[in-house]
Image (cartoon, coloured by chain):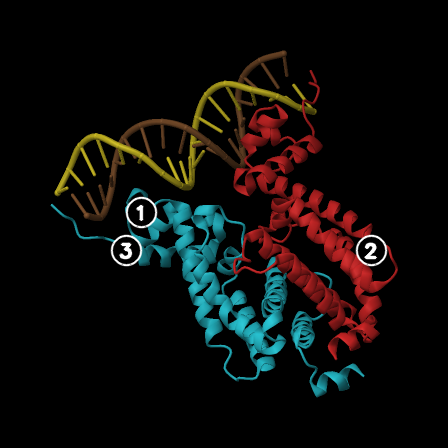
Chain colours: A cyan, B red, C brown, D yellow
Amino acid sequence: MPTPARTSVDAIVAAGRSILEAEGLDGLTMQRVAAVVGVRPPSLYKRVRDRWALVRLIVTDVAAELATTLETAATTGDPRADLRALAVAYRAFALAHPEAHGLLFARLPEPARVDATLNARAAEPILRTAAALAGPDDAMEAARTVVAWANGFVGMELAGAFRLGGDVDEAFDYGIERITRSIAAVESAEDRSSLG
Amino acid sequence: MPTPARTSVDAIVAAGRSILEAEGLDGLTMQRVAAVVGVRPPSLYKRVRDRWALVRLIVTDVAAELATTLETAATTGDPRADLRALAVAYRAFALAHPEAHGLLFARLPEPARVDATLNARAAEPILRTAAALAGPDDAMEAARTVVAWANGFVGMELAGAFRLGGDVDEAFDYGIERITRSIAAVESAEDRSSLG
DNA sequence: ACCTGAACACCGTTCAAGT
DNA sequence: ACCTGAACACCGTTCAAGT
């Protein structure tokens, strides 16, 4: 006799994300997840293969949310303004979901790695903006430079690595401004005057 | 009746580092460490408070090694060449010790966090070089821009995040060159000609 | 079909008892 | 002093038995 489902993959992923954010990856246990969705731990294995598969589902969820956030962040049409908006949106996302963001770029075992196409979707707005700024030939290198900087910046911020004083917001502003300038194929008038 | 010590903190840390690099943080268990150093797990608690304290000792060891590596990397006296040398040395260190490097910037629980003074020692060569290039007023922001970029770049490289094709070495070269140029207080002659 | 208790292998950690 | 076996609480995972 069939029994009605008492939970769902969506509920499990949602519970997992909230536990992850509250207690970190170590706190994300199958037992905690089961307790939150209201089943016994063995029942989770009807929906997800194992804990790493659950982590993969969570990371995928986070990556999709980030991709959507970035897609809606670059809207002005001016590549310089768009690049700054992308960096600001990315940083805000990371600070709002520190554990989830950490997982996005953590060294995870193969079964927890997110699909490459999703990776591409999140990268697309940056790649497009970088191409507009640096020209098609340098687009990939320019995009990687921006992404590496932004990723490293918020990663260090979240890891508490900026411990030598100074204003972190100021360093962020300085960074995005200099990097934008450096990957631009042609200097703007302001660049020349401020460099003089 | 006193018993001769059968292991040492140094041996435990060394074993821990080698297990970490071979099997990742999840594989770094007190049981594996005990087996490698040749004692039973409870004996480890005579030398380290708990597993996170051991992680802290390991991270401290790695950070000290990185600091020494960076200190000996910037030697030409030319800040542009030194900055590139620092970036190259940092990347080589990270690629040679991927798990250890990952730990260096991971979101670790408080008891595993490394001492701030060691942080400062590792940052010093970069801060000095950035100051020579960007001037004293922008030194901190410039150093943070370089460090964020380098850290993000190798972090993404190690996490397998560069999956859209293109040459990763080329992106690294492009990045360090553009960032160096962008934080320099005064343009060099080559900058002007290549920007023209 | 889905859920569960029981079970197994593993882990971190404590502690009394050994030398 | 240091080391150990035994023990406890916890974890991931499997599986036969329930509905």
Residue at which label 2 appears: B74
How far from the left and from the top, in percent, is residue B69?
77, 48
For residue B47, above or below residue A48: above
Q: Which mark is residue A8?
A: 3
> Label 3 to label 2, Cα distance in Å?
56 Å
> Label 3 to label 1, Cα distance in Å?
9 Å
Rendered residue at 48%/47% (across/down): A26
Amino acid type shown at disc 3: Ser
**Which numbered disc, 3 or 1, marks the residue that appears first in the sequence?**
3
Chain where mark 1 sits:
A
Amino acid type shown at disc 1: Leu
> Considering the image in quadrants, where does the N terminus of chain A appear?
top left
Left or right: residue B59 compared with residue B82: left
Residue at which label 1 appears: A44
Q: Are marks 3 and 1 on the same chain?
A: yes
Left or right: residue B152 compared with residue A98: right
Chain where mark 2 sits:
B
Chain where mark 3 sits:
A
How far from the left and from the top, in percent, is residue B152?
62, 60
For residue A116, above or below residue B20: below
